[in-house]
Image (spheres, grey):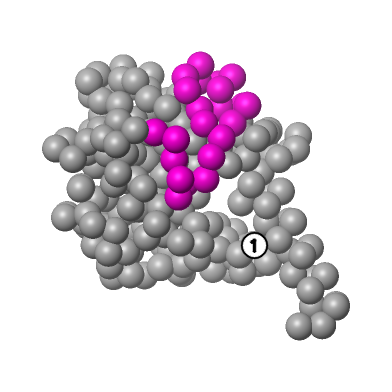
Amino acid sequence: MGVVERFREWRLDRLADRVARRPRGRAARATYGADDAHAFLWPPVLDALALGPDDRLLDVGCGGGVFLRHALAAAGCSGAGLDHSRDMVRLAREKTGVRVELAEAGAMPFADGEFTAVSCLVAFFFFADPVAVLREIRRVLDPGHGRVAVMTTAPEAKGTPAAPYPLATRGHFHTDDELLALAREAGFREARIAHRDEWSQLLVAQP
């Protein structure tokens, strides 16, 4: 790869990080801290998790914490968040008032079986090693009552407003069958596609 190509790739990586992969800056805080950030994705995730007051929810890639705040308030349960963007962690802590950790999804600072439910909205698209992340999610889930709901971007969305170029070149798209195979490889005993529309997929699994 020549100098020009390397510079172009570097610029694309910086753009992807700043805008979506590791959001930072005033515009990112306004986008991901908005009360309706990705709100159209919330209902199927909440339906799949069926949270109750006794649940302990972890939101992986929680962004500004808006979904986490809504889910905890709606269910009356406890929870925590995780993100690898310092700006998003600070914002999520302000929005939710709960524990929000700055860490990578493949190495979470939580105990085995600490949560009964895990949500992940949009962030899965950016995980370079999705099996490693799913294994880590399975580790922190209660083996008897745990379940995970992963809402991600469908392959058909590539090049659309849901995954525009050039950001789409930095994402990882999976077919429905590939998502199910990833869950099985990570050790989940049950997995299904619980929701599917033109641009998104919802993977639901139990350890």
Query: Is residue 47 visible in the rendered structure shown here?
Result: no
Q: Quadrant of residue 176?
A: bottom left
Residue under the point 33% across and 70% down = 178
Residue under the point 73% across and 56% down = 15
Quickly name the residue at label 1: 167
Of residues 33 and 86, the one drawn nearer to the viewer in this rendering? 86
- Tell me where residue 186 appears, x and y as whole percent: 29, 58
Q: Does residue 55 sit above or below 198 in this rendering?
A: above
Asked whether, in this view, residue 16 is left or right of residue 131, the answer is right
Asked whether, in this view, residue 42 is left or right of residue 94, the answer is left
Quarter of the figure that contains the N terminus: bottom right
- Tell me where residue 147 appears, x and y as whole percent: 24, 42
Of residues 43 and 131, the one drawn nearer to the viewer in this rendering? 131
User: Magenta residues, as a range?
Assistant: 89-110
Residue type indicated by callout 1: Leu
Verify whether residue 151 appears in magenta: no
The residue sitting at the bottom extreme is 1
Of residues 27 and 22, the one drawn nearer to the viewer in this rendering? 22
Question: Which element is circle 1 on?
Answer: helix
